[in-house]
Image (spheres, helix red, strand yellow):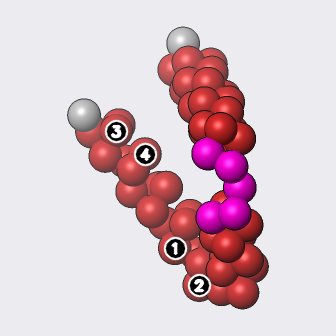
Amino acid sequence: MTDFLAALGLVLVIEGVVSAAFPNLTRAAMMTAAETPSAKLRVVGLVSAVIGIAIVWFVRR
């Protein structure tokens, strides 16, 4: 559970820094995501999750 909370905190730090450093690009990315079809977002999300699982598995083995 500690690792999960640390990972969640790291995600929030990274997203916060990106939003603070590049607010216009963040806004543009959100607008693009809002216009992207749900099926495409779903595929990108699943691929990202699989890559994330692979990274965690590789680091933790």
Q: Residue at x 67, y 33 (%)?
A: 43
Dominant secondary structure of the residues highlighted in magenta in the image: helix
Q: Are the two marked residues, 2 and 3, in contact with CB atoms closer than 8 angstroms? A: no
Graded by Cα atoms within 10 Å as few (under 14), some (14 to 19) or many (20 or more), the crowding at tag 4 reads few
Q: Are the two marked residues, 4 and 2, in contact with CB atoms closer than 8 angstroms? A: no
Q: CA distance from mark 2 to mark 1?
A: 6 Å
Residue that carries the numbered disc 2 in the rendered image: 20
32 or 48, which lies in front?
32
Residue type at the position of mark 2: Ala
Residue that carries the numbered disc 3 in the rendered image: 4
Q: Are the two marked residues, 2 and 1, in contact with CB atoms closer than 8 angstroms? A: yes
> In which quarter of the view is residue 50 placed?
top right
Q: CA distance from mark 2 to mark 3?
A: 24 Å
Task: Select label 4 or label 2 by which is in front.
Answer: 2
**Circle nearer the N terminus (4, 2):** 4
Left or right of 5 in this view: 17: right
Q: Which residues are magenta?
A: 34-38
Vertically, is 22 above or below 56? below
State the image coordinates of residue 4 (x, y, percent, origin top left).
Answer: 34, 38
**Rendered-image quadrant of the N terminus:** top left
State the image coordinates of residue 25 (x, y, percent, origin top left).
Answer: 74, 79
Residue 6 appears in view = yes
On residue 16, which mark appears?
1
Q: Are the two marked residues, 4 and 3, in contact with CB atoms closer than 8 angstroms? A: yes
Residue type at the position of mark 1: Gly
Q: Secondary structure at mark 2?
A: helix
Task: Select label 1 or label 4 by which is in front.
Answer: 1
**Rendered-image quadrant of the C terminus:** top right
On residue 7, which mark appears?
4
Residue type at the position of mark 4: Ala
